[in-house]
Image (spheres, grey):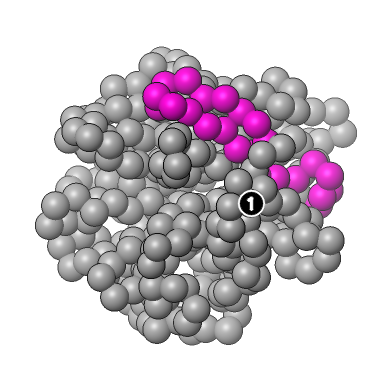
Amino acid sequence: MKWGKVGKIFDPRDHHLPNRCVEFAQSPQTLVLADRVRVYFSTRERDEVGKYLSHVTYVDYSLDMSAIIGLSSETVLPLGNLGCFDEHGIFPINVLHDGNRVLAYTTGWNRKVSVSADASIGLAISHDEGKTFVRPGPGPLLTASLNEPFMVADAFVKKYDDTYYMWYIFGTEWKKFPDYPEPDRIYKIAQATSKDGITWSRNGIKIIADKLNTDECQALPTVLFVGDRYHMYFCYRQAYDFRKNSDRSYRLGYAHSHDLITWTREDHLSGIDVSSSGWDSEMLCYPHIFESNGNVYMLYNGNEFGKFGFGLAKLEH
């Protein structure tokens, strides 16, 4: 795989976003329509006590990703009600055409006391080509279980033949590290299957090998069938000291599979890395690969976890 970087194509500071949001355009993910590519992302506002709330919005691009042709001016999906799993934010959201509707798999998060946050995967449905979504119920679709104790999140769903496949993450441990007073979470990538996109079968087994160490954190898988195999991109990092230390922050990982069961990790074949300078020189994170107008593209975030926008790369080989 060889990617050619187009550059940063969206900066939230250059646009008027709904919900008083002024920073972050995280985890860009697409819904390819007949005349445009709708790119959903999570942005943030400050609440009355100065803490972040994450909201979903979207920007529309031409099919060749060369121009912005629209921007959401309304709330795509309101935050959850008091005490719900998505009370404090939705980040990320993954969307899928399913007949005459669009399914959205959300990651809803809420604040905790002993640790910073927890998350679960939710469901929302759109009947207006993804302009707005409605929850079928207030609770999560997938949440903590016997072998996945917390942080069930980052769902990415594709349908192959008559089976829906979900790649997602689950937390394995909150861990305290020397010289760092706050605990950090460790999470891995797993896979689930479904016949209707709503009821899922999962086993809590990680499917991607660790590269850094057993505390490696893996996040936001995205999968596409190109050539003769399935390709997965994801981001990974050290478990602590990753926010300001570029050497320990997110990079993009790569794995491939012929059968959607066994995945071989070969990061050296990813074809993309941090730049020598600029907006994506310190980290690469939250990738999303998709097809449009006969091309394969990747959207991704750079420095500071997407605080200043997202960029685009195009598959060259």
Relative to the observer, which residue lies in front, 57 or 162?
162
Instruction: Classify residue 135 as left or right of residue 315.
Output: left
Q: Is residue 115 magenta?
A: no
Q: Residue at x 15, y 62 (%)?
A: 127
**Residue 106: horizontal and vertical position, in percent?**
37, 48
- Does any portion of residue 18 appear in the rendered image? no
- Does any portion of residue 103 appear in the rendered image? yes
Q: Is residue 258 magenta?
A: yes
**Residue 16: horizontal and vertical position, in percent?**
48, 84
Relative to the observer, which residue lies in front, 15 or 231?
231
Q: Which residue is mark 1?
A: 2
Q: Secondary structure at mark 1?
A: loop
Whether residue 63 is situated above or below residue 30 in the rendered picture:
below
Determine which quarter of the picture holds residue 58.
bottom left
Whether residue 27 is situated above or below residue 203 in the rendered picture:
below
Q: Which residues are magenta?
A: 244-267
Q: Residue at x 70, y 20 (%)?
A: 214
Tag 1: amino acid: Lys
